[in-house]
Image: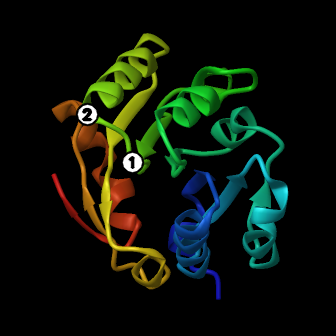
Amino acid sequence: MHNKKNGNIKIGIIGTGILGNAVGLNLLKSGFNVTAYNRTKEKTNELKKHGAKIAESPKIVAENSDLVIIIVKDANAVKKIAFGKNGIRFGNHNGLTVADMSTISPIESKEITKKFLEHKIIKLDTPVMGGPNVAIIGKLVLMVSGDKKHLTSSKKFLRKLQTRYFI
């Protein structure tokens, strides 16, 4: 079932392991347009089967998304998909927002945020509580932080994720 109200909001997911896949399936079920990328392409098969577009690079995800959700294993992986060859920064466009759900230290997160801002990309730190069993039904708890101006402009996306969140 495709919800026309959410169908105009384009969400990218980079990192479709167990949690990223569950988040993506929930978003697809809720009627969002989802573009996904994972360096191991087979990990995107379930999302593709449910209607996600599969991208060849993080750059293409960014080009085709209003909000890019990053769910990768560590800070080095975030840096690589964000700033490396064909990274998110190369797909930047006006209003692009990145929500990083990866588990990384606050110090590394601040460094990554600073680098995103150098490229005029809005970044929100979005650690989550809950796992794939709650992600797939939209019950993750998001703890969102970032510049107040960016938080305000991104509330529309956060509400649409159908999860509980704290700002």
Q: Which image quadrant: the N terminus?
A: bottom right
Q: Which mark is residue 54?
A: none
SS class of the residue under badge 1?
loop
Residue 71 image offset from top left, x and y in percent: 51, 52
Q: Quadrant of residue 110?
A: top left
CB atoms of marks 2 and 1 within 8 Å: no
Give the residue at x 54% y 27%.
79
Residue 18 image offset from top left, x and y in percent: 58, 69
Q: Please say if 135 is above or below 128.
A: below
How many marks are shown on the rendered structure? 2
Relative horizontal placement of residue 69, taking residue 60 as reference (left or right):
left
Which residue extends farthest top? 118
Residue, disc 2: 106
Q: Please say if 149 is above or below 129.
A: above
The alpha-carbon separation of the residues under discs 2 and 1 comes to: 9 Å
Give the residue at x 49% y 14%.
119
Q: Nearer the viewer, residue 139 or 62?
A: 139
Type of amino acid at the residue the image marks with label 1: Thr
Give the residue at x 53% y 79%.
30
Residue, disc 1: 103
